[in-house]
Image: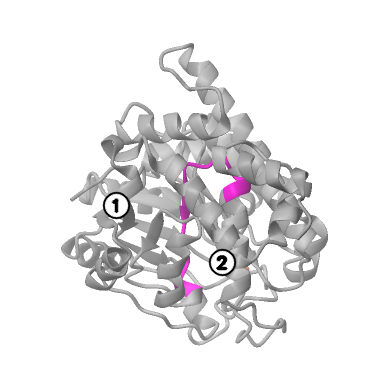
Amino acid sequence: MIYDAALDSLLQRVWDGGRINLDEVRRLAALPLEELGALADRRRELHRRAAHGGKGEGIITYIVDRNVNYTNICNVYCKFCAFYRTEKDADSYVITTAEMDQKIEETIALGGTQILLQGGHHPKLTKQWYLDLLSHIRAKFPGFNVHGFSPSEFVAFSEFFNEPVEQILRDFTAAGLGSVPGGGGEILVDRVRKRIAPLKADSNQWMGVMDTAHQLGLASSATMMFGHVETFDDRLEHLEFVRNQQDKSLERVRNAERGARNWGATPIEHAAAYASALEAGELKGGAFTAFICWTFQPENAVLKAPTVGSHEYLKTQALSRIYLDNFPSVQSSWVTQGLDIGQVALKYGANDLGSIMIEENVVSSAGTTFRMTVPDMQRLIRDLGYEPRQRDNWYRLVN
Ligand code: SF4
């Protein structure tokens, strides 16, 4: 075999925790999957060393929450979506307060700490409807987090309410919104978005909402849905876009603190310092806490695409963990890949098994119906030799 000094040096830099560029991601993508997985696992270790009182390397977390889709009425008609309905459809709905209460009570009874609240882009729901819902939840269930509304929903709200996104975020937060999920990101490249979701927020609008949310001190997550019409380079462009935003958001948090803590010198250290501050309750947000990638579900009847299998999923997640050096956490995606691959993904860079998702409507509408319980989750984590721990949205351990 011919010795490749450049590759050797790249592998060493990845092992040591250095930053890599997109050309280097392309080089890593050609490695055998198990070698790539070992590098991603090493990066997971480096990220988690300082977490959870210095025990982060041996802990894999999960969250107990419920995915509540407050309406399925939507005027965006994404080509990959089997969930949306029009107002005329007999099975269209808007959630009632009583239904919401019941869902939250059931979630709390199962040890849940939050709801992931997302829905279709319903043009007739008023701003007051959302404010009333958030205020009601805060008053009735104090301490329970609403992780709510994807950036594309906020862009739609801005149009429906004729108000800037910033004002809506401020008012929603004052009423009870706690954090913002990264839904609707799909692939943040406009030529891709135009093909699969031409009426949805474009990539700059999506990221603009996240930037504003971070400026207001909210924590959020970033996602990538891949395996449809995008190319490998489109995925890389997506990763570059979110890494650049995270650099910007973390720098803003650091500057606002004016030297109050030691942030370290490298992006991994910046991410670790941010995660530690969140866990200690010294910060509420201001940046991305986690990255989650999942595969498009080809059972969907509208957009046809070849199935993306577990090899491609694990490779993409491993590359994401290595490239996104400024993200504290990477979440495994068992909802689209199944429990077994969700478990294996914990050896390919993920440090969190995500949510048990007491209720999930969007992926299951597209034909995928994997289910997980807390004992399942704990067993999957223990089988790998890690300690399973429940966390909240800010990665604070709750058990
Ligand atoms: S993915 Fe979301 S925005 Fe797109 S059609 Fe479905 S519900 Fe509407």
Q: Residue at x 30, y 36 (%)?
A: 54
Q: Position of residue 158 (x, y in %)?
A: 62, 47
Residue 337 percent location from the top left of the image: 50, 75
Residue that mark 2 sits on: 314
Where residue 104 appears, x then y in whole percent?
26, 62
- Can residue 94 be seen at all in this image of the molecule? no
Q: Going by the image, does 193 lie left or right of 179?
A: right
Q: Is residue 39 visible?
A: yes
Magenta part of the protein: which range?
Answer: 322-336
Q: Which of the two residues, 219 or 295, is positioned nearer the viewer here? A: 295
Circle on res. 106: none
**Residue in the foreground of this view, choosing between 394 and 378:** 378
Which numbered disc flags the more N-terminal residue, 2 or 1?
A: 1
Query: Mark 1 Cα within 10 Å, few/some/many (few <14, many 20+)?
Result: many
Q: How many marks?
A: 2
- For label 1, the residue is 137
Compared with 278, 195 (above or below) is below
The residue depicted at 39 percent of the width and 69 percent of the height is 95
In the image, what residue type sits under mark 2? Leu
Say whether residue 329 is magenta.
yes
Q: CA distance from mark 2 to mark 1?
A: 38 Å
Q: Nearer the viewer, residue 244 or 205?
A: 244
The N terminus - image quarter: bottom right
CA neighbours of label 2 inside 10 A, class few (<14), some (14 to 19), many (20+):
many
Q: Which quadrant of the view contains residue 200?
A: bottom right
Say left or right for 65 vs 316.
left
Viewer-nearest of discs 2 and 1:
2
Q: Is residue 277 magenta?
A: no
Residue at 38 percent across and 43 percent down: it is: 178
In the rendered image, the vertical position of residue 343 relative to residue 274, given as above or below? below
Name the spot of residue 105 as percent of width and height, x first. Answer: 20, 63
